[in-house]
Amino acid sequence: MYRVIRMRKVGRVTAALTATAVLLAGCGRTESSVGGSAAAPSTIGSAPATGTLTIWAQADEAAGLPAFAEEFMKANPGLTITVNPLPWDAAHSKYQTAIAGGSTPDIAQMGTTWMSDFQDAFAPVPTSIDTSAFFEGSAKTNEVGGTMLGVPWYVDTRVFYYRKDLAEKAGWKEFPKTWDEFKKFGKDLQTKAGAKWGIGLPATGTDSFQSMLMFPWSAGAKLTNDDNSKWTLDSQQWIDALTYYQSFFKDGISNPNPDTGAGAAEAAFVDGSTPVLVAGPSGIGSISKAGGGADYQSKFAVGRVPSNSSSTSFVGGSNLVVFKNSKNADAAWKFIQWMSTPEVQVRWQKAVGDLPAVKSAWQDKAFADDEFLKVFGAQLEDTAAPPTVTTWTQVSAAADKVLERIVRSDADPATSLKSLQSQADSIGTGS
């Protein structure tokens, strides 16, 4: 069963809105090389952590972190940790401002697609931390220019949620495993189970392109070449994937104009008008809530991304980084190392609901016996992430508009992708 987020109060740990950052112009990357700092330790000392640490974190993680910081301080009596919460929608600008003003914390929660934005401000990961312990796709989001600048904290991958009762009515006892099966599944939900739309797919809006990358990746397409020096958005694999994706809208299986308002997808899922949607682990809770509570979990299930040449999904989540101007980097990395132990990762999932980034944590019985989580665990073995280049946001925004034309205006995928490739070439990769 899905674990709800628990809010905790703590003693020594303080939680306060971050309002100290000074707004300065010229924020962002510095002139220094990627990562690297004399203050960054190559290894982590064995003595207890001492001194003070300040951690900036966002949303649910900021609410759950103080209890764990309190536990770590009890094991390291000479250490004081302060956790400052940031709202997600303001966090990027807060970090940008803090870097420009030299007022960064010791540790920060970093969105996986933000790593390249602030790469020059991060200290490299000490060799004492075994980065092979993390899921490969998640670990790669921390690698910028061949240097590991953070470690995965938790992961978020996308799977398909579907109504079991309607699937059975349509003649499907299991979730489809291939692209051909997936499309037939959607059509059967319409013709045999009464669904208005068989499959809910991202169609338009911010990050719609990023949200459908599971299809190109599963067709063998890549966003860039191996050294991230050139975009590769017009390959035959891309054309095949976008042609397949467009067919759902051309054939009336997916809605080209879905309601993207808060809770709309969950409501359509519950009333059966769109009984399949793609989402991360938070979908377990949001769908259950829309269906009236935890008992509704018996009505739905999750399935892995249908396979073409692979079954590759998007991996996101958050990373933990240490800023290179931290005056207590050794203690910072000790805390991160402790948060990365399998036992703590399991307890973090139970407390906050985040999926563990450490592979061995998934051997815990709590995951193996959970019908939802074990599918997420299997999907995490085959994931990918956008490249850690500074121009990804620009290219992704351009791609959102191209996708909208393909979905809504029946634009030719090959011609559209050639245009996108041209735009991406003009933007570059920043490398």
Image (cartoon, rainbow, N blue to C red):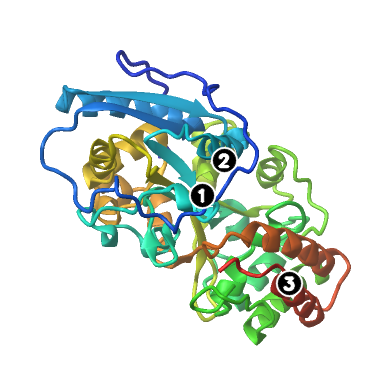
Instruction: State the residue at coordinates (76%, 71%).
Output: 423
Return the residue nearer the eye: 334 or 268.
Answer: 334
| Residue for badge 2 | 96
Query: For the view shown, which residue lies furthest in the left direction?
Result: 47
Q: Earlier in the sequence, mark 1 or mark 2?
A: 2
In the rendered structure, are the residues bearing label 1 and label 2 in contact, judged by CB atoms less than 8 Å apart? Answer: yes
- Categorize mark 3 by other alpha carbons within 10 Å: few (<14), some (14-19), many (20+): few
Query: For the view shown, which residue lies furthest in the bottom direction?
Result: 236
Query: For the view shown, which residue lies furthest in the top direction?
Result: 11
Up/down of 225 relative to 275, above or below: below
- Categorize mark 1 by other alpha carbons within 10 Å: few (<14), some (14-19), many (20+): many
Across and down, in percent, residue 306 comes to: 54, 70
Q: Earlier in the sequence, mark 1 or mark 3?
A: 1
Instruction: State the residue at coordinates (55%, 39%).
Output: 100
Return the residue nearer the eye: 335 or 262.
Answer: 335
Across and down, in percent, residue 154 comes to: 40, 47
| Residue for badge 1 | 118
Query: For the view shown, which residue lies furthest in the front direction?
Result: 31
Q: Amino acid at mark 2?
A: Gln
Instruction: State the residue at coordinates (79%, 51%).
Output: 258
Up/down of 379 relative to 7, above or below: below
Estimate the spatial distance between the alpha carbons at disc 1 and disc 3, rounded to whole Å: 22 Å
Q: Earlier in the sequence, mark 3 or mark 2?
A: 2
Up/down of 41 relative to 246, above or below: above
When asked about the image quadrant of residue 196, the answer is bottom right
Q: Regarding mark 3 in the picture, which secondary structure is present there?
A: helix
| Residue for badge 3 | 426
Q: Amino acid at mark 3?
A: Ser
